[in-house]
Image: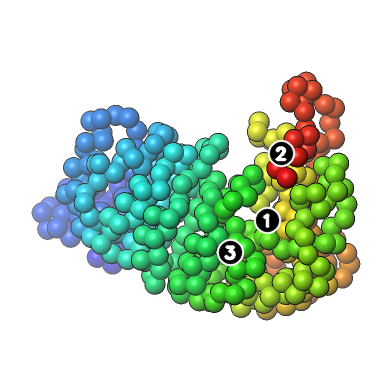
């Protein structure tokens, strides 16, 4: 059996045909990990269903790929009632119409304790995954064993649930919530709330989540042709801002095993959904300033960092003192950042924009 761990799925299927003894030996190994491609072919779907129900007690990890919409809703009726040993699942498919109750039902199908859950969008969605109350309540039952949780798609996860996970998942190594820059109701952590909570995830290696609701009174420039305080900058004094930021830095500083820290959310300026002014309008303004004056030096304990993502955040790190600090304290880290204008914003006006106008023209609707 020592050899079996090095064999591919194809190699294992060949071994099954050698003799009955080899079949008994290698059959459980073959079904430890399964890779499913789901399409609209009913014959293939029924064959997959029979195989899953026959071997559900052997499956430890599952990868699911599909290009079909409403994919989880379609897949669940073909699954067995329970997977006795399933601890890892990865969905690489369209997640746009995946519903909260369907995700919760799938999570509850495992009799084992989940260690890894990944939801990855295979195509750019207009909406996003509905990972909400029912899903999180099901997930939190596995908080003591969960090591990897990634939502690599648009999402509106409530900040309360994200914080609860960080306060209960002591073995968590990866938290990845890529979110969407246009989503302001979820997919991010509230700085004012997390400073009052106690995170237990001291082994965290990947942290990708926006942190907002921080007053930034030092931002005084005009944003989308209007004063910053009109909508974009949270109100508060400079003293309140520095105090809150230092508390957030202190919380992050305890995550000393971090290899990847992503607080920004880069915008795809090449997408057909991108319009002139989007970067400036949807940029994070209520975020950490990442300056020494705001308390950046508190993060010097994160010397293991290899990736720091600060894209499309209103930060001021181009000064010599911040750059020197990064070189001395995060010598191996690649630091990503981006300006609020692009070539597309400075290009001649597109005919469509003459009709629809700039996003900032409708800003009063959000006040």
* Corner quadrant of residue 59: bottom left
Q: Secondary structure at mark 2?
A: helix
| Picture coordinates of residue 19, whole percent (x, y) | 12, 52
Tell me which residue sits at (39%, 72%) in the image. 144
Residue 127 horizontal/vertical position (percent): 53, 39
What secondary structure is found at the residue carrying circle 3?
strand
- Name the residue located 65 percent from the left edge and 68 percent from the top edge: 192
The residue identified by callout 2 is 365
Q: Using the numbered discs, state the Cα–Cα distance from disc 3 to disc 1 in whole angstroms.
A: 11 Å
Residue 272's tag is: none
Q: Position of residue 291 (x, y in %)?
A: 80, 68
- Asked if residue 8 lies left or right of residue 79, the reply is right
Disc 2 and disc 3 in contact, CB within 8 angstroms: no
Pair 2/1: label in front:
2
Q: Quadrant of the N terminus?
A: bottom left
Does the rendering let one see residue 315?
yes
Q: Quadrant of the C terminus?
A: top right
Badge nearest the viewer, 2 or 3:
2
In this view, 350 is above or below 169: above
Mark 2 or mark 3: whose residue is earlier in sequence: 3
Question: N-terminal of the two: label 2 or label 1?
Answer: 1
Taking the image as shown, residue 177 lies to the left or right of residue 350, namely left
Q: CA distance from mark 2 to mark 3?
A: 33 Å
> Front-most of 179 and 61?
179
Q: Give the crowd class for mark 2: few <14, some 14-19, many >=20 residues within 10 Å.
A: few
Judging by the rendered image, the residue that carries numbered circle 3 is 207
Residue 41 higher or lower than 134, as above or below: above
> Toward which corner of the image does residue 207 lie, by quadrant?
bottom right
Q: What numbered label is drawn on residue 264?
A: 1
User: Where residue 198 sits: x, y (%)?
Assistant: 54, 77
């Amino acid at each position: 059996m020592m050899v079996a761990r090095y064999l591919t799925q194809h190699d294992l299927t060949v071994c099954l045909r050698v003799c009955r003894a080899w079949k008994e030996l290698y059959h459980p190994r073959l079904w430890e990990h399964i890779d499913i491609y789901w399409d609209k072919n009913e014959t293939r779907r029924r064959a997959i269903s029979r195989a899953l129900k026959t071997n559900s007690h052997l499956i430890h990890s599952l990868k699911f790929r599909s290009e079909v919409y409403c994919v989880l809703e379609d897949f669940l009726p073909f699954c067995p009632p329970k997977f006795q040993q399933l601890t890892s699942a990865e969905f690489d498919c369209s997640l746009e119409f995946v519903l909260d109750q369907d995700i919760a039902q799938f999570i509850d199908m495992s009799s084992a304790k989940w260690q890894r859950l990944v939801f990855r969008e295979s195509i750019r969605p207009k909406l996003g995954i509905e990972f909400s109350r029912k899903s999180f309540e099901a997930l939190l039952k596995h908080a003591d064993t969960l090591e990897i949780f990634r939502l690599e798609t648009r999402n509106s996860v409530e900040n309360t649930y994200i914080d609860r996970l960080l306060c209960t998942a002591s073995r968590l190594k990866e938290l990845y919530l890529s979110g969407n820059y246009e989503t302001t109701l979820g997919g991010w952590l509230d700085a004012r709330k997390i400073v009052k909570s106690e995170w237990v995830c001291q082994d965290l290696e990947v942290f990708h989540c926006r942190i907002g609701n921080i007053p930034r009174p030092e931002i005084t420039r005009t944003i989308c042709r209007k004063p910053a305080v009109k909508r974009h900058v949270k109100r508060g004094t400079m003293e309140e801002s520095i105090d809150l930021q230092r508390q957030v830095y202190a919380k992050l500083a305890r995550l000393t095993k971090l290899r990847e820290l992503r607080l920004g959310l880069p915008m795809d300026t090449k997408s057909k959904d991108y319009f002139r002014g989007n970067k400036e309008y949807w940029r994070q303004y209520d975020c950490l300033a990442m300056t020494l004056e705001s308390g950046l030096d508190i993060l010097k304990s994160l010397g293991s960092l290899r990736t720091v993502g600060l894209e499309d955040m209103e930060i001021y790190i181009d000064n010599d003192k911040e750059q020197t600090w990064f070189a001395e304290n995060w010598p191996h880290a690649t630091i990503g950042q981006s300006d609020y204008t692009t070539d597309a914003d400075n290009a001649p006006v597109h005919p469509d924009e003459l009709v629809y106008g700039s996003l900032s023209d409708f800003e009063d609707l959000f006040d």
